[in-house]
Image (tube, grey):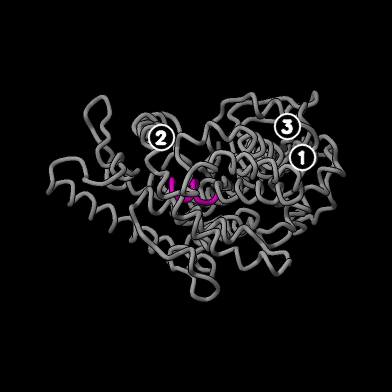
């Protein structure tokens, strides 16, 4: 066979040719993916979308009640499910009916920490603490931390609860005579942060006395970290770290991470040094969360590493502070809307304290506050304090007779209400 007519390619030309062939192959694969994603979601209702950046821009830009109200409106408009187009290449299916959300709730799927996963955005701050860890790492940490939540440990914090709550009462007393409405969440948030800092860190602050521009730097850092995390989650072009950390939001997020980590490390090192010098249990009225972390050992007599301890402290501080503040704020709001139930709760407390010379609540009083407990639980049922739980599907699943592919991110949004219990789930297709 005569091959003299074939062109003689140099090495560079051959490399370029192979690269071009591979590029065409990737384009074909991507085009097939786009076609497949559009075919899957073509009959799923949604808001009008832009051909390039989808319809995520319709969401309110700030993490506020506007976003909740918008989501409630979407749930009322689309009764069972609808789709968000994050970009032209990624779709998010929102399931908003108990029957359609059951598939997600019944599954036992890992927490996604890959590209586009909400938990991934918290890794620089919280690391692989209990909130983000999964698999064997989560199970080991959970076993080691269980003693920290024993009732015999928790009941020793009651003095801290009383003292911090008295400060809260002093702060909101000025609103009693004015008759004006006020936002209770900032005050309750400072309360819960004060309690967590004192119980988990033995870290004394004046955070309940800080307002406006003079807010405590740790309080301010935590709030800004939460806001940045939430805002980044609804902004797809900020998902890549190389882009996010070039923005003012990303640079501030990194500075705040460095600051809260510095505070945690200083407190941990100081406590570890004190324990090593004393060689015994710390001499104080209660054993705090940090003491438990420093002394915990697994079955192989291996304790938590310094990084693991810091991750768990940061995680416990965030989850205990933010979610507790949300639950308490909703409970106070609900009781304010229903004064007849508020009076019953007050009467129950007055009955317990009537023969005392003090208004301090004891740990033994808590089981007696039956009506107050029911009101708090009902408030949490109606307004769950954790708005989003995310999971990743690793296999195909079917909703309303329609099959969606595996590798799905599932957002369980527990605050959207249709019936009891009201839940919604966001499913993000990634392939």
For numbered disc 1, what is the local secondary structure? loop
Residue carrying label 2: 149
Q: Observer-nearest residue: 387 or 148?
A: 148
Q: Is residue 391 left or right of residue 429?
A: left
Q: What residue is at 54 percent from the left and 63 percent from the top?
A: 170
Q: Which residues are magenta?
A: 315-322
Residue 338 in the image: x percent, y percent?
Answer: 76, 46
Give the mark, 1 or 2, whose residue is nearer the N terminus: 2
Between disc 2 and disc 3, the foreground one is 2
Q: What residue does disc 3 label? A: 421
Where in the figure is residue 328, as x and y percent of width and height?
60, 48
Pointer 1 residue: 417
Per the image, is 113 magenta? no
Q: Position of residue 172 (x, y in %)?
A: 60, 63
- Asked if residue 155 is positioned above or below residue 276 in the image, the reply reads above
Q: Residue at (73%, 32%) from the top-left corner? A: 421
Residue 218, disc: none
Query: Can residue 254 be seen here?
Result: no
- Nearer to us in this view, 71 or 93: 71
Q: Residue at x 76, y 31 (%)?
A: 420
Q: Is residue 119 above or below residue 145?
A: below
């Amino acid at each position: 066979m005569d091959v003299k007519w074939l062109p003689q390619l140099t090495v560079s030309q051959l490399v370029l040719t192979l690269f071009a062939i591979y590029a065409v192959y990737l384009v074909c694969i991507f085009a097939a993916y786009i076609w497949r994603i559009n075919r899957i979601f073509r009959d799923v209702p949604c808001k009008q979308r832009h051909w390039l950046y989808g319809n995520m821009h319709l969401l309110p830009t700030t993490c506020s009640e506007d976003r909740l109200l918008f989501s409630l409106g979407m749930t009322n408009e689309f009764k069972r499910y609808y789709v968000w187009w994050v970009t032209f290449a990624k779709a998010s299916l929102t399931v908003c009916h108990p029957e359609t959300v059951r598939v997600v709730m019944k599954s036992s799927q890992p927490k996604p920490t890959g590209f586009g996963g909400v938990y991934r955005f918290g890794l620089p701050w919280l690391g692989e603490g209990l909130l983000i860890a999964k698999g064997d790492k989560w199970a080991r940490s959970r076993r080691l931390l269980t003693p920290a939540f024993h009732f015999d440990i928790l009941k020793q914090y009651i003095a801290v609860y009383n003292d911090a709550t008295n400060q809260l009462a002093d702060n909101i007393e000025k609103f009693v005579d004015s008759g004006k409405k006020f936002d209770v969440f900032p005050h309750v948030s400072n309360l819960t942060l004060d309690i967590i800092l004192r119980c988990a860190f033995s870290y004394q602050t004046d955070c309940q006395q800080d307002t406006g521009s003079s807010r405590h730097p740790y309080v301010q850092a935590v709030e800004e970290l939460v806001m940045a995390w939430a805002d980044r989650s609804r902004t797809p072009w900020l998902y890549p770290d190389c882009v996010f950390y070039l923005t003012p939001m990303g640079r501030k997020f990194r500075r705040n991470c460095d600051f809260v980590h510095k505070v945690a490390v200083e407190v941990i090192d100081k406590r570890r040094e004190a324990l090593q010098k004393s060689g015994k249990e710390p001499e104080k009225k209660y054993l705090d969360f940090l003491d438990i972390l420093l002394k915990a050992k697994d079955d192989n007599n291996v304790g938590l590493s310094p990084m693991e301890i810091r991750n768990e402290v940061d995680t416990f501080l965030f989850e205990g502070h933010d979610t507790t503040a949300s639950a308490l704020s909703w409970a106070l709001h609900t009781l304010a809307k229903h004064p007849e139930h508020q009076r019953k709760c007050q009467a129950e407390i007055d009955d317990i304290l009537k023969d005392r010379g003090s208004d301090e609540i004891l740990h033994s009083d808590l089981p007696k506050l039956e009506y107050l407990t029911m009101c708090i639980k009902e408030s949490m049922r109606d307004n769950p304090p954790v708005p989003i739980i995310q999971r990743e599907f690793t296999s195909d699943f079917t909703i309303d007779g329609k099959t969606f592919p595996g590798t799905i991110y599932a957002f369980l949004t527990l605050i959207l209400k249709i019936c009891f219990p009201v839940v919604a789930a966001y499913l993000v297709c990634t392939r």
